[in-house]
Image (cartoon, rainbow, N blue to C red):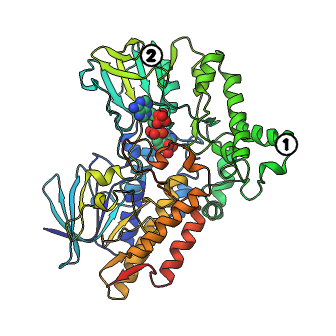
Amino acid sequence: MEHFDVIVVGAGFGGIYATYRYREQGFNVHCIDSAADVGGVWYHNRYPGARCDVRSIDYSYSFSPELQREWRWSERFSAQPEILEYANHVVDRFGLRPLISLCTRMDKAQWREEAKQWQLETNTGRDIRCQYLVLATGPLSYPHTPDFPGLESFGGECYQTSRWPHEPVDFTGKRVAVVGTGSSGIQSIPVIAEQCVHLTVFQRTPNFSLPSRNGPLSDEEFEPIRQIYEEYRTEMRNNHAGQFMPDAGRSKPAAEYTPEEQQAVLEYGWERGGIGVGGAFSDSLTNQDTNDIIAEFIRSKIRSIVVDPRVADILCPTDHPVSTKRPCVDTGYYETFNRDNVELVDVRQDPIATITPDGMRTQNRHFKFDIIVLATGFDAFTGPMKAIDLLNGAGEHIMDRWQNGPRTYLGIMTSGFPNLFQVTGPGSPSILANCIIAAEDDVDWIGRCIAWLNEHGYNRIEATKQAEDEWVAHVAQVADYTLYPKANSWYMGANIPGKPRIFLSYVGGLQNYRAIAVSKAEAGYEGFEIA
Ligand code: NAP
């Protein structure tokens, strides 16, 4: 039997930082991950074109001034290999590798009330006990594979973007299908199209995608930030998205601009690149009329890029407001549909009926493929919980508590599950913000909480049912103030058949969330039962 103060599950960006931070605090900490190396989502999502859609100088750790001054990103939006290299660099630079057990999956965890500890079972047969269990399993880590009839009968190669093989996939001379046009599809489609002989894209819902304007990160751009990185980080932390937003606080409701000024604001955002256009006005996500102006602007861009008006029409989103599904950031996505070797199929008009040994049959047609790529997304937040036998002291599975949707207090704890913390859990800003900064905040909060418990001679903490109920209601109330609930998005759990429809993240902003979480801690962990 092995005993630790803290077990961290997941060696992605949240788990790496948690392991570092809790070791620095003097805890006996260990991290486990089922993958063969560190990096979490960036270890698995190695599909062609995978890259960050938040600027890398923002999407990187802020906890070490030395680290952030030393590391030099090569591009504005770095590609997956460089992000994975960075994760490995951090692990080695801070000597964390001995504290991480790879290829180790937590199959079961149960709270033992008499011992006030969690008991873990792993696929490697280890019997691990810990006082505090920290889940850094990632909001977007559990793949969603649609239940297409005949999928197992396919005789060619089939890949999922979220579980991409480590060996190179050769598309040369191949007829390829990509199913799904979320961020993963939109990033991989232009790259695959350049390599294969023919690509068929199966689109169910068109997405709003914005050009990244990616390119090399020049010294002129980076050096001034490197000089003031700490101040830059402070500014980043103090807005709702946890990333540098030069226009934050300066934008106004669309109605306060003339139509010409509105177009100029949008053109500026489009040319600058990244997700800025989606939030160009202060009421972009709360006022349907404002959102319609942005949506029409993006649709006009799609029509100006895509030569075939019929294809442009299929690519134009009309069923959800801009940014209520995660906006995509692309490099040459719409231009790809002008290529002779690319075809777009609207599966709302012609649904996928079955996968066949040599391809795919839709209601109206039969396609022959050598390779099928499923870019069909994730079971966000709850997927990893379903995969673990996560039981409280009474033997109740956490998913039984979450039958009507995930329930947390501050996104960090669930009532009935003492000493179990989540990093970027449901009900936290996580996926609506810069996830690395959000994870650092959560890890720090949890670290301070455990230190406080130790200092005061406590060994058990649990969210109260009342605090949890109030937080769940608050998260829903804030979301209802926005346009987000109008979309059938993974934010709403709508991408998974049968998943309860509730908004999974906290829309109130990273800085507001941090202020609330810190105030609860400073009030002696208000909303928690301490023993
Ligand atoms: P996603 O946004 O959920 O997209 C999945 C796509 O698959 C959607 O187009 C969906 O259509 C389609 N789909 C699912 N089931 C289908 C079915 N049965 N038939 C036909 N189409 C089906 O997943 P994702 O692209 O992996 O992205 C998920 C999130 O991960 C992103 O929103 C982002 O937060 C993150 N991500 C980030 C990056 C980055 O930073 N660079 C890259 C990739 C992903 P519907 O829309 O109709 O459901």
Nearer to us: label 1 or label 2 = 1
Query: In this image, 135 relative to 507: left or right?
Result: left
Secondary element at tag 1: helix
Say few, some or many: other residues with alpha carbon within 10 Å of mark 1 (under 14 / 14 to 19 / 20 or more): few
How far, Cα to Cα, is label 1 from label 2? Answer: 43 Å
Say few, some or many: other residues with alpha carbon within 10 Å of mark 2 (under 14 / 14 to 19 / 20 or more): some
- Residue 261: image location, x then y, percent: 85, 42
**In this view, 24 is above or below 125:** below
Q: Can the viewer see residue 187 in this picture? A: yes
* Residue marked by disc 1: 261
Residue found at x 69% / y 49%: 284
- Residue 111: image location, x then y, percent: 22, 70
- Residue 296: image location, x then y, percent: 71, 34
Residue found at x 27% / y 45%: 36
Quadrant assignment for the C terminus: bottom left
Query: In this image, 400 relative to 183: left or right?
Result: left
Residue found at x 41% / y 71%: 446
Q: Nearer the viewer, residue 147 or 53?
A: 147
Residue found at x 34% / y 65%: 134
Dividing the picture into quadrants, the one containing residue 274 is top right
Query: In this image, 513 relative to 365: left or right?
Result: right
- Residue 453: image location, x then y, percent: 36, 82
Disc 1 marks which amino acid? Glu
Disc 2 marks which amino acid? Cys
Secondary element at tag 2: loop
Quadrant assignment for the N terminus: bottom left
Dividing the picture into quadrants, the one containing residue 231 is bottom right
Kindly check if marks 1 and 2 are in contact, taking CB atoms under 8 A apart as contact.
no
Q: Nearer the viewer, residue 341 or 284?
A: 284
Q: Can the viewer see residue 272 in this picture? A: no
* Residue marked by disc 2: 196
Nearer-N-terminus badge (1/2): 2
